[in-house]
Image (spheres, grey):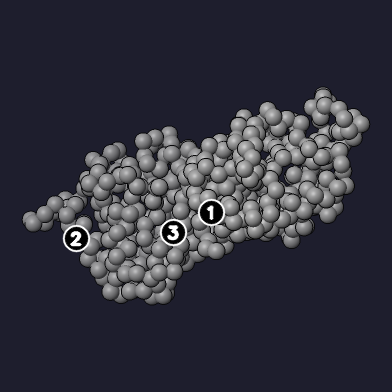
Amino acid sequence: MISVCGPLSTLFCAPRRRLQGGTRRACRTTSAGSLLGWLLAGLLLSAPAGLRPEEETAAPPPGPGKPAPPESATAGGSPETAARDEYAALVAKLSGLYPDRDAVLESHARIRAQLVEFAAAHPLAPEAGPARALAAEAALVAGDAAGARNLWAQLAQAGPRDSDRARGLYLLGEHYFLGLLDAVGLRRLSPAAREKRRLDLSASCERYLSALVRDYPEDPRAPAARRCLAYLGRLRSAAAPAFEARLRRGDEEVVHSLETLGGKVAILYFWRARSAGVFEDQRALLDGLRKDLADYPVLEGRVEVLGILLDRDPAPLREAVERWEIPWPQLHDGQGFDTPLARLFAIPSAPHYAVIDADGRQVYLGVLRDEFLPAAAGALKALRLRLESQGGSGDPTADEEPVPADAEGSEPREKADPAADPVPADAEGSESRDEGGDLHPEARSS
């Protein structure tokens, strides 16, 4: 697991989320520990997992355009030692002045200013990178996402070590990526504004994460960046990936593949038992399918729902299937977000929805129920019209010109509620990180 945001967010309850599997775990908690504790630990915990502290103790030699090391070294030690001592003194001072969360929230600007001042005074010190990263977290606490982005950009451009510059790129890319998963923020927008926001966020995310993978391919954050980039590619893809999955419905094993699902509408539902909205999702899907099949018998046997549980513990699956009477087969291999089908679709959060039409096209992948249900309805409508034109018994893949899916759904009852007036899209990233909604599977408690 990659850890890139240090304990600052734990104390501040900063609404940062870590992508799961490339992905990350939430750093959100209500504990209020010692400021000294999180700052000192931040020197180690803010580094990616697997990178030992001793590997980050020496700053690289200054390159072209980089400042030279300070000349004033005390007789008792090197400039690196002096910077480390000064940082420890700063930590002790801040810990005494702001011992709890409330004090930190009230004085975030002072904390941020002192951390930035230290980093500016010691640009090549190993502690300068963590100081800027923690100052960015303080900016996020205050809701100043633009300030956080500015600090991350400074880290990416002038961090003292490769790992610091890679961290800056990752935090910038991750910020925009989380905007793509911000279901609450996206729901506020009209369809046109929503699409523009997604394009802007995707472009910014790809810019920074591609730079990370290109310039620092061996950095421990690179696998997470690659998975995020894979998700962006999957969003752009019109063809569903080839797959084979072994699921279970009670004691029965059910095997599905993209090939065997040809001529059918396939709905893939990636979920976790404790994710918000899971019961409502499955109930809405079940009720909608029952009504469609009752209204249009020609669709009988032409739709398959695959549930993919991303909990590692199997107990929630048994409880949910029994309590909610889930009729479709489920896949659970205990690998969480590393289950092969989730990795194939590069799933970064749960719940997540995918719809594959009768021609093997991926017509939806995303986090919004009010987009997923109409997309499924549209794919079913296209298949129904084709089957009815063939008398209900022909090969559903026989037509040379398939009927396009109606993105608004097959019936008025299935259309999404009209959006309110468009909210200006913030092309600079997600500003509603604390309104997680469906943002991340581990970002909320039950």
List x then y, in percent, for residue 223. Answer: 43, 39
Q: Nearer the viewer, residue 186 or 154?
A: 186
**Among the two numbered marks 1 and 3 on one chain, the one whose residue lies closer to the N terminus:** 3
**CB atoms of marks 2 and 3 within 8 Å:** no
Q: Which residue is mark 2?
A: 85
Q: Nearer the viewer, residue 30 or 188?
A: 30
**What's the distance in space between the residues labelled 2 and 3, CA to CA?**
28 Å
Q: Nearer the viewer, residue 331 or 270?
A: 331
Circle on res. 27: 3
Front of the two marks 1 and 2: 1
Q: Secondary structure at mark 1?
A: helix
The secondary element bearing badge 2 is classed as helix
Report crowding for label 2: few under 14, some 14 to 19, many 20 or more residues within 10 A (C-alpha): few
As shown in the figure, which amino acid type bears the numbered disc 3? Cys
**Residue 315, which numbered label?**
1
Tell me which amino acid carries mark 2: Asp
Q: Going 75% across and 35% down the picture, which residue do you hit?
A: 264
Q: Residue 394: where, in percent of width, then height?
A: 86, 27
Q: CA distance from mark 1 to mark 3?
A: 25 Å
- Amino acid carrying label 1: it is Ala
Q: Quadrant of residue 109?
A: bottom left
Q: Position of residue 337 (x, y in %)?
A: 51, 45
Marks 2 and 3, the one that precedes in the sequence: 3
Residue 27 sits above or below residue 303 on the image? below
Position of the C terminus, as image quadrant, is bottom right
Residue 86 coordinates in the image, percent (x, y): 21, 61
Do residues under tags 1 and 2 come within 8 Å of each other at their CB atoms?
Answer: no
In this picture, residue 108 sits left or right of residue 308: left
Question: In this rendering, would 197 be left or right of 335?
Answer: right
